[in-house]
Image (cartoon, rainbow, N blue to C red):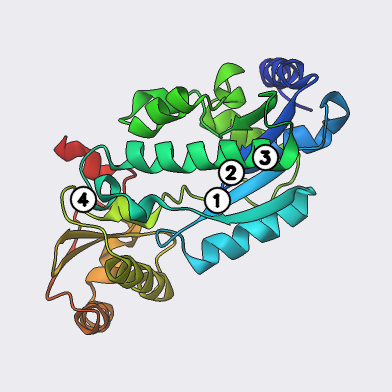
Amino acid sequence: MLDPLLAEKLNKLYDWAKGRACAIAFSGGVDSTTLAKALVERQDLLAVPPVGYFAESASSTELEKSEARRVANEIGLELRVVQSTEFDDPKFVENSPKRCYWCKKIRFSALKELAQRELGDPINASIALLDGSNADDSGDYRPGMQAALEVGVESPLLEAGLNKSEIRALADYWKLTVAQKPSTPCLATRIAYNLSITNDLLRKIETAEIAIKKAGASTCRARVDGPTSIRIEVPEAEIERFAQRETRLAIIEQMRDLGFFFISLDMEGFASGKNNRAI
């Protein structure tokens, strides 16, 4: 049984969906997956079945793409993988604090145009592009939300007043495998602002995080603070394990092989959005 307040918010989401034709900017994370599941569950309310779009670029990992496909299949969502072009724009590559704005503006504009072309009448703007923003997202620095607003992306989880814990509760209720999945922002968020984003650097970060997880981290961030400096975040309870000599020396060797010569273990531990503290 759902909590009465949560059930009320879910019904509000269903009321929002009535008669809609929807495309979802789908990442395979808990937010977009739970939103997609809700629409698939009650697609009888929709004008047409929902479709998900996964925007792939150098800032995506192979694991993220395969997980998006797996989760879409799990919930019965048609998923289309499309190439994103934010790396063609110098404003994104220069990695200012507005990086996420430029990325989302490019991605959402392209996805909305594509969804309209593929799913609807190009003249009649009837296809709604949705994202997984929720009621907790307004409390952080999220320039991407401004881009979404400008493009006309809709955020039904936010409109229904659903926060992260409630979304996870819904995912648990539906027995979704992503219910407790940690947040997985794009690899570009690991790079300190104003340090240029390159495919080579992103692949190094991807490889570093795979190595850190293989060493026993339940989740992690490999944050690049300079061209040859990497700062490793693991949950506070796991810091002691990574400070042990054998693990530490193995990680140092792997990071040096990637071209990082100044390697630190963050004493505070893992925290989402830590790069935003600088602004």
Instruction: State whether residue 183 is above or below residue 211.
Output: above
> How far is disc 4 from disc 1 in space, using C-alphas?
30 Å
Q: Which residue is tagged 2?
A: 30
> How far is disc 3 from disc 2 in space, using C-alphas?
28 Å
> How far is disc 3 from disc 1 in space, using C-alphas?
33 Å
Q: Is residue 2 left or right of residue 112?
A: right
The residue depicted at 39 percent of the width and 34 percent of the height is 144
Q: Residues within 10 Å of mark 2 (few under 14, many from 20)?
A: many
The residue depicted at 17 percent of the width and 74 percent of the height is 260
User: Which mark lies nearer to you, 2 or 1?
Assistant: 2
Q: Which residue is tagged 3?
A: 117
Residue 88: quadrant of the picture: bottom left
Considering only order in the chain, which callout, 4 or 3, is on the residue closer to the N terminus? 4
Q: Which residue is tagged 4?
A: 94
> The residue tagged with tag 2: helix, strand or loop?
helix
Q: Are marks 4 and 1 in contact (CB under 8 Å)?
A: no
State whether residue 34 appears in this view: no
Q: Amino acid at mark 4?
A: Glu
What label does residue 181 carry, if any? Answer: 1
Residue 240: quadrant of the picture: bottom left
Considering only order in the chain, which callout, 1 or 4, is on the residue closer to the N terminus? 4
> The residue tagged with tag 4: helix, strand or loop?
loop
Work out which residue is located at the far front of the displayed protein and give it. 123
Q: Amino acid at mark 3?
A: Arg
Considering only order in the chain, which callout, 4 or 2, is on the residue closer to the N terminus? 2
